[in-house]
Amino acid sequence: PAVDPWEVPILLARPRDLLRLSSHKYGDDAWDLAVQQVIPHIDGVRSAKQLARAARVDLDVVLRSLRVLRHYRCLAVVDTFQYRNIYRATGRVAQLAASRRALEGCARFCFQGEGRKTVGGLDALRLYCAFSDARSVKDVLLEAARTAPKAVAALDARAFVAFGLVHALLVRVHRFPTAVRAHPVERSRTPPPPFLGRLVALCDGSKMMDAVCTDVDLPVARCDAELRRHGYATVDVYR
């Protein structure tokens, strides 16, 4: 499967173990020089485009390398973590509930620090169930902070979401924005930023916001702020 520039790759094995894999096992062209150069930079935080910049490798080369790793099931991809991201729980949450071993593994991955001693897999399960109706990470955690403060205090939110995506417990509900002129902009001595035209053109309703932000190299909040500042509003569809 292809990897998109805005997706965040996550290794499913330790980097040093991947680099030790022999070509005898995976084929002569599996771990070429590009793959070997990319692997140490995969941290589960940077998007593929950011990874290309960090590794000083052409983006197309990075995407091909990630596709190789994904093909051999050494890599999964998730979204760039943001508390505003909206997710929906899937039917696989029920399978998690039915397996004690899976619950224990989930707890080890999602909770951290001393607080992990007082929580367990059932606490993580309840948090996943809170996404039964599509909701943002922020909304779920704010609500859980009142009902299960120990679980939220011990939770590694990034790891929690990543675990949910990799194991298909959660699916992302993406935002597709359409920029529309909301009001005329008063003349200013400050010219509009050079990326504004590109940003408005990308917000045509056909592209998810993650793709838009990656293209213009700006976070969501900055994109929204620049659009508002220059007289645009967005009509958003979530799907």
Image: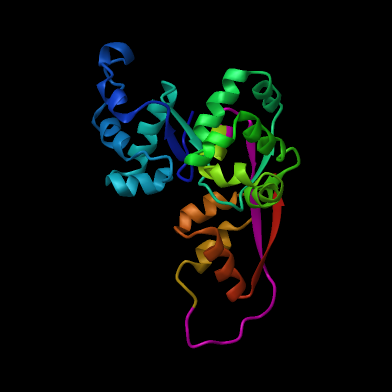
Res 31 seen here:
no
- The residue at the point 62 percent across, 34 percent down is 124
- The residue at the point 55 percent across, 42 percent down is 155
Tell me the quarter of the picture where residue 12 sits: top left
Quarter of the C terminus within the rendering: top right
The reply, left or right, for residue 49 in relation to residue 6 is: left
Q: Residue 139: x, y in percent?
A: 68, 51
- Residue furthest out toward the right: 133
Res 66 seen here:
yes
Q: Residue 153: x, y in percent?
A: 57, 47
Tell me the quarter of the picture where residue 178 sits: bottom right
Front-most of residues 112 and 224: 112
- The residue at the point 54 percent across, 33 percent down is 163
Labels in figure, total: 0
Q: Which residues are magenta?
A: 164-191
Q: How is the image coloured?
A: rainbow
Q: Residue 233: x, y in percent?
A: 67, 67
Q: Is residue 107 above or below residue 185?
A: above
